[in-house]
Image (spheres, rainbow, N blue to C red):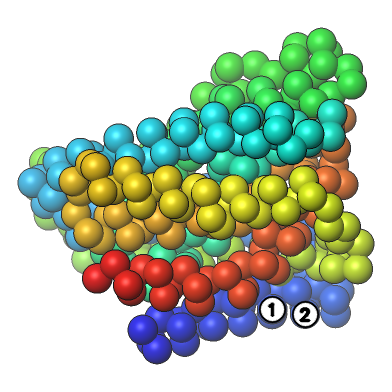
Amino acid sequence: MLDAYLNIFVIFFLMFIGYWLSYKQWFSNQIADVFSKLVLNLALPFSMFLNMTEKFSKSEFLNLFQGMLIPILSMGITFIFSLLYSKFTHVKKGRKGTFSTMFTCSNTIFIGLPINLAIFGEISVPYVLLYYIINTTFFWTIGIYMIAKDSSVYESAKVRFHPVTALKKIISPAILGFVIGLIWMLLEIPLPLFLRSFSSYLGHLTTPLSMFVIGIIVYQIGIRNLRLNKDIVGVLLGRYLISPLIVWLLGQIIQIPEMMLHVFIVQSAMPIQNSVPILARNYQADEEFAASSLGYSILGYLFYIPLLLVFINGLN
């Protein structure tokens, strides 16, 4: 358990470096965009390819997809809970859709992947990706629709939303890396040494660049600009209490491997998606609410993750 804490400390220290270098004007929003593109379009796909070809066999893969039911059900239940919560706590009009999206969807790659690697090691990556597939599909379909509904000019916002755009986000390079690695593994094709080395070099960029991006985002939001209110508290309850609790309860009913359940719990208890404030701005929703929620969810995670680790270790 001590090793897990130390590994997580290293992850957050990388985030602090991203924050510090932003303060020193080394990093900017443009740099964050470049790093994001490098992670999502290059480093992560090769990481997924390498993990699928080296870490799994045919039988293990079939067991992997048996667990897909838990993230599907948990996100559906969490979303319904978010709608009920926003109704009974009177979430402010113009932010209800954004509230439900942040309540339900996790930051499964930029924070989720490094944290799971720190806690469980590379064996967790396929489980991380499985949750990521469901989370991303929900976010770029129902989630983006809910954010668009918050706009005061909802009709025009609705026009700008197109299913093809959502499909492009779902079928991402990371998913393609997973699929190519899956086919490679199922066909049992030997992996050449040069391709293994190349994939490893690029894949290892994922964690440091991801945490640099988070550090840049926290700096750009500005800690002094964060405004806490009851709706943000509701988002944090959804992210850090309700969502992982639902996953754990489903895990008591649906039998899946212990490691898979633990990864799903960790994935469900991540900060909100980086993209939410950008989308809120694009759809003329409550951008300040989205940005403050993102800031609080990231900063709060520093204090929350030790409690989550205690809970995970208590399940063993």
The vertical placement of 135 against 158, above or below, is below
The vertical placement of 182 against 30, above or below, is above
Indicate the position of residue 190 as horizontal and vertical percent values: 12, 54
Element carrying mark 1: helix
Please tell me how crowded label 1 is: few (under 14), some (14-19), or many (20+) other residues with Cα within 10 Å: some
* Residue nearest the observer in this picture, 46 or 262: 262
* Residue nearest the observer in this picture, 181 or 233: 233
Element carrying mark 2: helix
Residue drawn at 91 percent across, 62 percent down = 225
Q: What residue is shown with label 2?
A: 20
Please tell me how crowded label 2 is: few (under 14), some (14-19), or many (20+) other residues with Cα within 10 Å: some
Residue 101 visible, this angle: no
Q: Are marks 2 and 1 in contact (CB under 8 Å)?
A: yes
Query: How many numbered markers are drawn?
Result: 2
**Would residue 200 be found to the left or right of residue 308 on screen?**
left
Indicate the position of residue 314 as horizontal and vertical percent values: 32, 72
Residue drawn at 43 percent across, 73 percent down = 309
Q: Quadrant of the N terminus?
A: bottom left
Residue drawn at 22 percent across, 59 percent down = 258
* Residue nearest the observer in this picture, 196 or 119: 119
The vertical placement of 158 against 55, above or below, is above
Q: Amino acid at mark 1?
A: Phe
Q: What residue is shown with label 1?
A: 16
**Would residue 300 be found to the left or right of residue 189 on screen?**
right
**Would residue 158 be found to the left or right of residue 48 on screen?**
right
Residue 186 visible, this angle: yes
Q: Amino acid at mark 2?
A: Trp
